[in-house]
Image (spheres, rainbow, N blue to C red):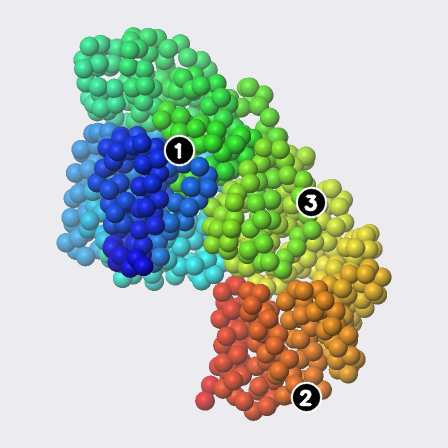
Amino acid sequence: MRGLAENRAGGRTVESNALGLLLREARQRALLTLEGLAEASGVSVRAISDMERGKSLPRQATLGELMDALEVSEEQRRHMVAAARPRTRPVPRQLPPDLAVFRGREGALAKLRALEDRAAFQGGHVVISSIGGMAGVGKTALAVHWAHQMSERFPDGQLYVNLRGFEDSGEPLDPGAALGVFLRGLGLPSTDIPSATEQRSALFRRRAASLKLIVILDNARDTEQARPLLPGAPGCLTIVTSRNRLLGLAAADGASPVSLDVWTPQESLAALAARIGAERCAAEPEAAAEVVRLCGHLPLAVAVVGAQLGAEPHLSLRVAVRELREARPRLDALAADDRTVDVRAVFSRSYRALSPATARFFRYLSLHPGSAASAQAAASLAGLPMAQARGHLRELASASLLSRDADGRYVLHDLVRAYGAELAERHADDRLGAQERLLSYLHHNAKSANAHVMPQFRSGLPDDVAAGTVHVAIDDRTDALDWYRQEEQTAAAALRGADDPRLRRGRIHVALEWVAYNDTTGRWPEEIAATRVALDAALRLDDPVAVERSCHNLIRALIETGRGDETGGLLETRLAHLPRLPAEHRTGAERRASWTCSQLGRSDEALAHARTALAIARTLGRPDELVRALLEVAFKVSDNGEHREAVGLCEEALPASRDTGERRIEALAWGTLGVARSRLGDLDAAVGDMETALHLFEEDLDDYNQAETLDNLASVHHRRGAIEEARTCWLRAAELFTGLRVARAAEMRAKAEALRP
């Protein structure tokens, strides 16, 4: 048996050499030496050798480059990604790669070095704000280059986020969402992250207080967006980039502004020479100078043109100059003071060099609504198989039209995205079809993931997958949660941005399928936002089933977050649609209405809805619906003091619950019986019933109902005089509700504290 290799690699412990064996086997199948794989992937021989020997684990982006170079199958790719997962909390390494062709900026770098040296001497932290720089001026490149130079001084890792402050196609990234990325990067599970931005900010500052971190806040919109993300710790270096002058950070937070202008002509030429060769520039010096002048000495433009010229080593620079001058129309957003300089010509030239199939793929990729696209989402947008999509993504990356983030997702610069969207309009590409496929991808893979995340959840939504939708292989709960986390931002952006009336059904399906993940992980704010979108679409479609379910999901999310006073109009909307529901939907809807009315203190209405649900369920011939309806009535009559009737209903429900074969339904029956017996004073029997229910809920990974049962069990222990047992149960319930970010956690904790000796 192979022992554990306790090697440290980028802050991660390598527990076995599984990835190394897979990597070596794939390299040997490809008939590549270490040097050959290094040349094909761009990863150094030393790094590949360390991976194969089990001395290190790669970042996702690095692993992606290796797998692309080896052309492994999708199944092999999944095995390698799984083997590369660290077994301990990683030290965050979120920095994008440093540019090997980084040139110039000596003045700015000297100022940054002076700021850091002074801060280190004084024991303070630094906020570096790159202000006054236009888009594409190289703010991010400078920040990343500087951070890599400083990384050894900050051994606890680097955090990076693109705040998307100036995207034409979307809203700036919410600081709370960015804080969620940072906190997960520091090892916190989603269930431990609070929902409110202020609480997330305070938690981030506490976590960073004892660490030496580099934090890059890239492309900030304004001071208000950046300020909650400042670690405020003396051991941290914070770098903020923005197109705006962030004077508030300088005035109130001690930021040291660094203004970044376009390159000097000398810097531009040096950067171009680094990409296409000094000899080529020297052979046509006037044309080379004119190329960078027509780029406005803008680093992004020089980089794209340089990459394209590098791919065409025999093309005359004079021809490149003529094409840059003649290209029309131009990208207005990046015009310099000289109106003859426009970056759209640069993008156009790069785009025209693509193969026709990749050019079409690029146009579809530009329609992605989020800041970063997974390969699967990109393939779904274009309606292509994964192998073809990965080939197009590699070609686009080679043409410098996209990059990859630390998680291996594909990122289009906002201006490149705008250019691609213009092309999609011009070519009359099927924008609607692309959006339908993306919504279908988010819906149907969520359905597959839910079989592992919440097995008892049944959305009941149709399985008509749009042609061209990528199906992701999801084998276990880890895969499912990884997929959900990968697509969180995409789902939110797709729900917000898919505003075509013909997409309303797809938006409803995504929102109703993702409720299982939001419920399981306590993402109540995200659930509220998604369900409001679904409810609006359902009302416009006049679909009573979708209206009822969306109303219920929204009402429940509001109640669980302590906002029950906001449900009034929603409840009336929902109740108005109940009589319109088909019988097979009506019983569940009546049960849900009963729960809601009970939570809002409307006990008579709650009982009426429960009895209606039971009457309908007795006509359906479905044991699962009958059991649920029996238990709903049992709860409500017990609340009204009719405890013996409640026991009788539970005793009728128990045999039927076993027939369903679902642990959760049987657990609900035992739990409800325990509550009814406790109210009759049969406390010993009640304890046994509730402990049986608790065991079944634990087997079913149902945290919410575990917490409910623990609350009931604690009350029974308290009545029996078993104070320590009661206190233990309430503390466990508080812990579970806290993980789900349910407001009742405070109530459970207060009950436990009241019993403290």
Specify whether 745 is left or right of 44: right
The image shows residue 675 at horizontal and vertical percentages of 67, 79
The image shows residue 205 at horizontal and vertical percentages of 34, 59
Determine whether label 1 and label 3 are within 8 Å by CB.
no
Task: Read off the residue under disc 2.
Answer: 682
Q: Which element is circle 3 on?
A: loop
The mark that comes first in sequence, 2 or 3, is 3
Q: Is residue 533 visible?
A: no
Residue depicted at 49% across the width and 34% down the height: 386
Determine whether label 2 and label 3 are within 8 Å by CB.
no
Question: Which mark, residue 462?
Answer: 3
Task: Read off the residue under disc 1.
Answer: 71
Q: Residues within 10 Å of mark 2 (few under 14, many from 20)?
A: some
Rendered view: 506 above or below 319: below
Q: Quadrant of residue 62?
A: top left
Residue type (three-letter) at the residue carrying disc 3: Pro
In this rendering, the label closer to the viewer, 2 or 1 = 1
The mark that comes first in sequence, 1 or 3, is 1
Q: Which element is circle 2 on?
A: loop
Rendered view: 94 above or below 682: above
Q: Nearer the viewer, residue 110 or 403?
A: 403
The mark that comes first in sequence, 2 or 1, is 1
Residue type (three-letter) at the residue carrying disc 2: Asp
